[in-house]
Amino acid sequence: RSISIGPDTETAIVTETDSSCTTCISDNYAHCIGNATLVDCKVNEESCQLIERRRGGVVNFVEMGCKDRVYRFLVAVQF
């Protein structure tokens, strides 16, 4: 596993295996990566995700972890 902070300190470079993801939640990349853990994903979690929120162009929320598979069902409704 390899986790590093990008050159601008607001990007993350994360290398994972097929069945695991780096997980963390913080208000910045440095703290998130510094406290990250590697977890095995569940069967219905087929990829890793990164959520980043910015305010005024500044990162104020970072979350990394396993991503659930999204199912879309077409439901016919009669009225």
Image (cartoon, rainbow, N blue to C red):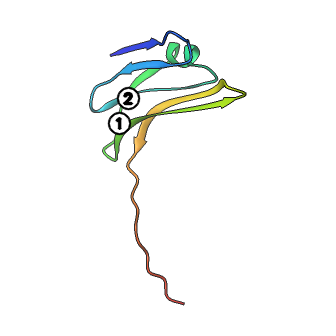
Question: Gap between marks 2 and 1, in whole Å?
Answer: 7 Å
Q: In the drawing, does residue 18 fall left or right of residue 60? A: left
Left or right of 47: which side holds 75?
Answer: right
Q: Nearer the viewer, residue 26 or 37?
A: 26
For label 2, the SS is strand
Q: Amino acid at mark 1?
A: Cys
Q: Amino acid at mark 2?
A: Cys
In the picture, the quarter occupied by the C terminus is bottom right
Quarter occupied by residue 31: top right
> With respect to residue 37, does 66 lie above or below?
below
Say the numbered circle drawn on residue 29. Answer: none
Residue 62, horizontal then vertical, whole percent? 57, 27
Disc 2: which residue:
21
Quadrant assignment for the N terminus: top left
Instruction: Return the residue nearer the eye: 6 or 72.
Output: 6
Q: Residue furthest bottom?
A: 79
Q: At x 48% / y 83%, what residue is drawn? A: 77
Residue in view at x 39 percent, y 20 percent: 14
Instruction: Name the residue rendered at 28%, 33% in the picture.
Output: 19
| Disc 1, SS | loop
Where is residue 55 shown, x and y percent of the image?
A: 71, 30
* Furthest residue toward top: 7
Q: Which residue is mark 1?
A: 41
Please state the horizontal and vertical placement of residue 16, each as a whole percent of the image.
Answer: 32, 24
Q: How many residues crowd mark 1 within 10 Å: few (<14), some (14–19), many (20+)?
A: some
The residue shown at (44%, 80%) is 76
In the image, residue 22 sits, relative to residue 72, either above or below, namely above
C-beta proximity under 8 Å, tags 2 and 1: yes
Q: Which is closer to the viewer, label 2 or label 1?
A: 2
Asked where in the image residue 66 lies, by quadrant, the reply is: top left
Q: Is residue 27 left or right of residue 41?
A: right
